[in-house]
Amino acid sequence: MLNLKTFDVWFITGSQDLYGPETLAQAADHAKKIAEYLNNHHRIPVNIVYKPLVKNTEEIYNTIAEANKNSNCIGIITWMHTFSPAKMWIRGLNALKKPLLHLHTQFNRDIPWDQIDMDFMNLNQSAHGDREFGFIVSRMRINRKVVTGFWQDEEVADKINIWARAAAAWHDWQGAKFVRFGDNMRYVAVTDGDKVEAEIKFGFSVNTYAIGDLVAEIDKVSDEEITALVKEYETEYILAENAQEGGAQRQHVLDAAKIEIGLKNFLEAGGYKGFTDSFEDLHGMVQLPGIAVQRLMQQGYGFAGEGDWKTPALVRACKVMAAGLPGANAFMEDYTYHFDPDNSMVLGSHMLEVDASLAKDKPRLEVHPLGIGGKADPARLVFNAAGGSALNASLVDMGNRFRLIANTVEGVDVQNELPKLPVARVLWKPLPDMKTACTAWIYAGGAHHTVYSQNLSSEYLEDFARIAGIEFVKIDETTKLDQFENQLKWSEVFYQIQQ
Ligand code: MN
């Protein structure tokens, strides 16, 4: 999908005129070396672009105004090699519209004990220059990520990598469009919410189309296109006997392919990055989209079922954050529990729509009846997901704010055959343990719909929430229920006051 090397992060070094041309030239040279090092670092997925030193209010404001305007620039990194009196930064920071990372580093790793003199002290001042900058950012209540350490430390590159990926996902949301076919599943609370507030806060829009508009697009699909796509199915998947040519359910496979082509055409024509549908609104559709959705998610579209419009946006954001990393980011639902005290775990799945990028082995293409929706038997891909470290994330609307919840989990390889379960399956053990995690999740109001990520740690989502300016809570190996409940209560007060 996305190549993050098309995005730039600007490396802006603060200073002041006071030091004279020689020191300033040295400072610029050092800043260039750091920017180049980070730009070439294998773990950093975006371009790190050196910008000339900023030494006064005007240069700072002009550089930040340019960053705001530049459509490839997804964020800025600031560093104060020397002292840069921070009142000079107020005008620029007031205008800043892009994510901010403050790199608290020093050009020299070590103090040169035998050579150190006042010239060295004059140049290597980030120990206090960065404190002055940090004060004004805190004083102005601007969200940012602070990364501390020598610039060649692997941990520093890793933290910049995580933030840059979060910034790329944020950039992808700005102006993004998601389409909602039909409305929310009747009476469901957690999947609903304030779409106006979401657009103000997040920058993406959600608008509805009637399912009939999609049906019209599906009706335009030709037999030749269907034949070509079914050929693709035949090479990529193992077809169940009744789904093969001449099989009793073959027509349902052709219908599913027709839906996939029509749906993709609709999304491409409208420039959408994701969508949601509802089994309660299928007028004119022959079946609920199954394999179509599974394959479109694999291609990078966000999706969630039942009119849930927040989860498709989060699925899309996680896919962008993880671009190029091994592993999948998928729409998921906590479906049913295994409460064996020695081996507690969650079985995650959905009626049909489990992202095909989770498949551990070649998926089976099967056609089975679906109990709800009242339509023809839908075609779907059936597979198991691999085990390994993962997390579940959920975005909910608390009325006065959005809350992003992340729970780190340990994915479990599916051992049993599950011969009567005709959907894709994922198994995991939530951290710190099943009971604590599920209790905390419910206290936090986390949804049953999530993004299941095999390659993002909670730090990615924390950075993303910080950029978005929303609440972030995590449930992991350190979570204690009493402290977690208190955190939610205190946070409630914080957001009431902030309003
Ligand atoms: Mn669901």
Image (spheres, rainbow, N blue to C red):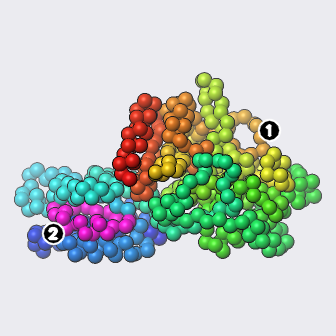
Counting residues from the N terminus, which is met first, the one under dot 2 or under dot 1? 2
- Relative placement, left or right, of 229 versus 131 is right
Give the residue displayed 47% in from the left and 38% down from the top: 475
Give the residue displayed 77% in from the left and 52% down from the top: 380
Which residue bears the numbered disc 1? 419
- 66 up-or-down from 304: above or below: below
Q: Residue furthest top?
A: 341
Range covered by the magenta-colored residues: 75-98
- Residue 231 shows in this picture: no
Residue 59 location (% of width, % of height): 23, 75
Asked if the beta carbon under badge 1 is closer than 8 A to the nearest atom of ligand 1, the reply is no
- Secondary element at image label 2: loop
* Numbered badge on residue 16: 2
Is 86 part of what is drawn in magenta? yes
Q: Nearer the viewer, residue 121 or 405?
A: 405
Mark 1, Cα crowd under 10 Å, few <14 / some 14-19 / many 20+, is few
What's the residue type where badge 1 is placed? Pro
Q: Nearer the viewer, residue 62 or 228?
A: 62
- 423 up-or-down from 297: above or below: above
Which image quadrant for residue 10?
bottom left
